[in-house]
Image: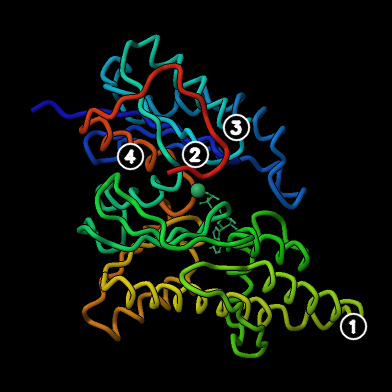
Amino acid sequence: KKKTIILGIESSCDDTGVSIIQNRKVLSNIIIHQKIHSKYGGVVPELASRLHDQNITKAVQQAIFSAKIHRDRIDAISFTLGPGLIGPLLVGASFAKSFSMGLEIPLLTVNHVQAHILSHFIQNANINNSYPNFPFLGLVISGGHTQIIKVNDFFQMEILGSTLDDSVGESLDKIARILGFYYPGGPMIEFFSKNGNQKKFIFSKPIVSGLDFSFSGFKSDVSQFIKKKLKKNTLFVKQNLSDICASIQNIIAEILLEKVEKAISQTGISRIVLAGGVSANHEIRRLFMSLSKKNKKLEIFIPKKEYTTDNGAMIAITGLLKYERKLFDSIHITPYSKFKT
Ligand code: KG4
Ligand code: ZN
């Protein structure tokens, strides 16, 4: 049987990702990061759109070149339809549509959040090197999203809980900014957490019923704390930086873990799949892994680092899974910015 080759395009935020996969194997996975946003403390949509436009042709050329295939071998093209920043999404959509028309191959649209979860169906994408069985609970933690999703099948997902305000990543990025770090702040907080005492500073955990999350109160508490300290004694934050970062990181990891434990007891599902940029965080990975060591019935799937943050491969694999089910889309479809299921 002939193997299916899919080219996937991701452009929902500030990374241009293009990947080619052959069945579930990644042949190439190109990511062009936009460094320009770092000094603004967050993504500037207009600048992001322009840079996607500049980078997308390069990324596609590089992806085809490093996959060592001729473009005529590509069976279908998939791209992120939403959610995300509308300008950046339009760049990817227009490119994908033109490519599909030019090569006369089917077009497949992808929901970005679903793709984060489905990245686990790329060959060897997680540290277990295995695919999760259905049903499982997906924890999507990124700059744009914080959700617990019950995944019954590839395209049968049910949202059990979401953030009522800020996402985890957004909160980390905003706190990081106050600490004087560049965007994205999550990796910086992780970096400075090394050797920090994570129980030195205790911040209160948000109280939210059910499986929803809230991070804006936590973010404000921490921000106020840092600002006050900075005002009083500029050296305090500098001298305690690693303890502050480690404490923030540990509390966030605990909040996430507690919600997931709640979801496990509510649904009786003990298979957990982590996804999204924040799941690159070592403290979160460590806490979830220790949970599975304590409870042998739990199965935890943790993505390899390259599949945590936004990438083209997760868009390509979702495209492949849709292609296999003949879930093609019309060339006239348009991107959306808000979450849809
Ligand atoms: O999945 P992603 O690349 O984009 C969205 O879909 O939003 O996630 C980006 C987010 C940013 O907020 C970034 O600070 C966070 O993921 N992030 C991390 C780490 N790496 C990326 N947060 C904590 N620790 C990390 N190592
Ligand atoms: Zn993402």
8 left or right of 69?
Answer: right
Residue positioned 58% across, 54% down in the render: 143
Element under disc 4: helix
Q: Does residue 302 sit above or below 15 in this rendering?
A: below
Instruction: Estimate the spatial distance between the alpha carbons at disc 1 and disc 3, rounded to whole Å.
Output: 42 Å
Q: Which residue is mark 4?
A: 318
Q: Secondary structure at mark 1?
A: loop
Residue wearing tag 2 = 31
For ligand 2, tell me if the residue under mark 4 lies within 8 Å. no
* Disc 1: CA contacts within 10 A as few (<14), some (14-19) or many (>=20): few
Amino acid at pointer 4: Thr
| Structural distance between the alpha carbons of marks 2 and 4 | 17 Å
Please name the amino acid that badge 1 sits on. Answer: Asn
Residue 196 in the figure: left or right of residue 73: right
* Residue 292 to residue 75: above or below: below
Precedes in sequence: disc 4 or disc 3: 3
| Mark 4 or 1, nearer chain start | 1
- CA gap, disc 4 to disc 1? 51 Å
* Image quarter of residue 312: top left
- Which residue does the numbered mark 3 point to in the structure image? 88
Pointer 3 local density, CA inside 10 Å: few below 14, some 14–19, many at least 20:
many
Circle 1 sits on which residue? 233
How far separated are the C-alphas under marks 3 and 2? Answer: 15 Å
Q: Position of residue 294 (x, y in %)?
A: 30, 86
Taking the image in four quarters, ligand 1 sits in the one at bottom right
